[in-house]
Amino acid sequence: AAPQAHAVAWDRVELVDDAGVIDPAQLRRDLAGIEFREPTRVAVVTERGPDLSALDDDRASQAFNGRVLERARAEHPDWLSADGQKWADGLVIVALDPDNRLIGVYVGEDRMLSTDQLRDVREAGHEAARAARWTDTVVEVTDAAAELIGRPWWQAPELWFGAGIVGVAGGGAAAAVLASRRR
């Protein structure tokens, strides 16, 4: 049987909109349509950080990630594991710095995503972010995370794409063998 889907309940959403760019009514409405495979808390954080334009992309991302972690340690210890070294289980954090055009996604150990998957999740919000539609950005990033977190291996599109290539190659090889035997 397929696992039960769990819509994002508003009482499991924490909005810390210091940048003042999120429409809470839209966020509430749109997040209600997103389903995770397991009950999940969602924290949405926005801030206007210091100008990072002098830094390359990697250093700017590291600075932003560090600020999000420091904020969690100082103001939201429930976002961290008991030892303070990892994000709390059952948690997805979507963070935005609209001035520096940065999007961060942080997940608990039980919601783990690969580096490539985290990149894909962030990229899901790029179009809305380019248009400065910040609430849409958060919703699209959260939806992309919900699609990937806990996805069974057999639902991965890469698997079916790879199986298709193997099938085509195998069919081509079988046809070649049959053709050579007929000669």
Image (spheres, rainbow, N blue to C red):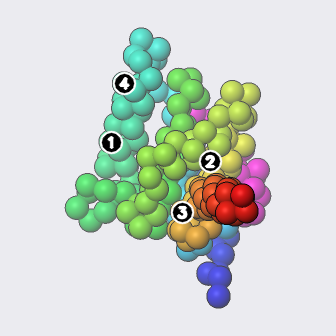
Alpha carbon separation for disc pair 4 and 1: 16 Å
Residue to which mark 3 is pinned? 149
Point out residue 109 in the picture as x, y percentages from the top left corner.
38, 63
Q: Is residue 39 left or right of residue 127?
A: left
Amino acid type at circle 2 is Val
The 10 Å Cα crowd at callout 3, few under 14, some 14 to 19, many 20 or more, is some
Alpha carbon separation for disc pair 4 and 3: 27 Å
Residue to which mark 2 is pinned? 141
> Extreme front residue here?
183
Alpha carbon separation for disc pair 1 and 3: 25 Å
Q: Is residue 95 visible?
A: no
Amino acid type at circle 3 is Ile
Mark 1 or mark 2, earlier in chain: 1
Alpha carbon separation for disc pair 2 and 3: 12 Å
Quarter of the rendering occupied by the C terminus: bottom right
Q: Secondary structure at mark 2?
A: helix
Alpha carbon separation for disc pair 1 and 2: 22 Å
Residue at image position (44%, 46%) is 115
Residue at image position (35%, 44%) is 69
Residue at image position (50%, 57%) is 92
Quarter of the rendering occupied by the N terminus: bottom right
- Along the viewing direction, whichever of 129 and 58 lies nearer the viewer: 58
Q: Are marks 4 and 1 in contact (CB under 8 Å)?
A: no
Q: Secondary structure at mark 4?
A: helix
The question of residue 151 being in magenta is answered with no
Q: Are marks 1 and 2 in contact (CB under 8 Å)?
A: no
Q: Quadrant of residue 124?
A: top right
Foreground: disc 1 or disc 3: 3
